[in-house]
Image: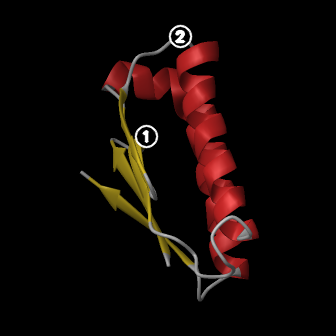
Amino acid sequence: MIKVSFVKKDGLICGYTVEGHSGLGYEGNDILCATVSSAAYMTVNTITDILNLEPEIQVKDGFMAIKLSSQQSVKAQDILCGFQLHLTALSEQYKENITVKISEV
């Protein structure tokens, strides 16, 4: 199962973690894992290479985490909200394979 956790502070997304594998298909042929990975990397790449922000990022096999400062969160909010919307829609379609949790700190 893919587990996604969004962290909000003062109503703004300030980070997320994505971990696990969906189990929908074999490694290398799992369309849901590929979709989530692609969206997660696009989000991070947009934040770093287009918005020129430098958040804390961790990436390992089956794991990605990003943490932004309050100022960075404001600048990246549109892309972060789009990513949350996309993954929430996927979790509704693939209830057995992906969960999305949103917490306020």
Q: Are marks 2 and 1 in contact (CB under 8 Å)?
A: no
Q: Quadrant of residue 65?
A: top left
Q: Is residue 48 left or right of residue 19?
A: right
* Residue 54 vertical placement versus 42 (above, below): above
For marks 2 and 1, give the CA distance: 19 Å
Q: Secondary structure at mark 1?
A: strand
- For label 1, the residue is 12
Q: Is residue 27 left or right of residue 63?
A: right
| Residue type, numbered disc 2 | Asn
Q: Position of residue 100 (x, y in %)?
A: 50, 69
Mark 1, Cα crowd under 10 Å, few <14 / some 14-19 / many 20+, is: some
Q: Position of residue 29 (x, y in %)?
A: 74, 69
- Of mark 2 and mark 1, the one earlier in the sequence is 1
Residue at the left extreme? 105
Q: Position of residue 17 (x, y in %)?
A: 40, 53
Q: Quadrant of residue 78?
A: top right
* Residue 25 vertical placement versus 69 (above, below): below
Q: Secondary structure at mark 2?
A: loop
Q: Is residue 55 left or right of residue 41?
A: left
Between 100 and 70, which is closer to the camera in this rendering?
Answer: 100
Residue at the top extreme? 52
* Residue 55 vertical placement versus 40 (above, below): above
The circle drawn on residue 52 is 2
Q: Position of residue 51 (x, y in %)?
A: 58, 15
Between 78 and 43, which is closer to the camera in this rendering?
Answer: 43
| Residue type, numbered disc 1 | Leu
The residue shown at (69%, 58%) is 34
Circle nearer the viewer, 2 or 1? 2
The residue shown at (62%, 66%) is 88
The residue shown at (30%, 55%) is 104
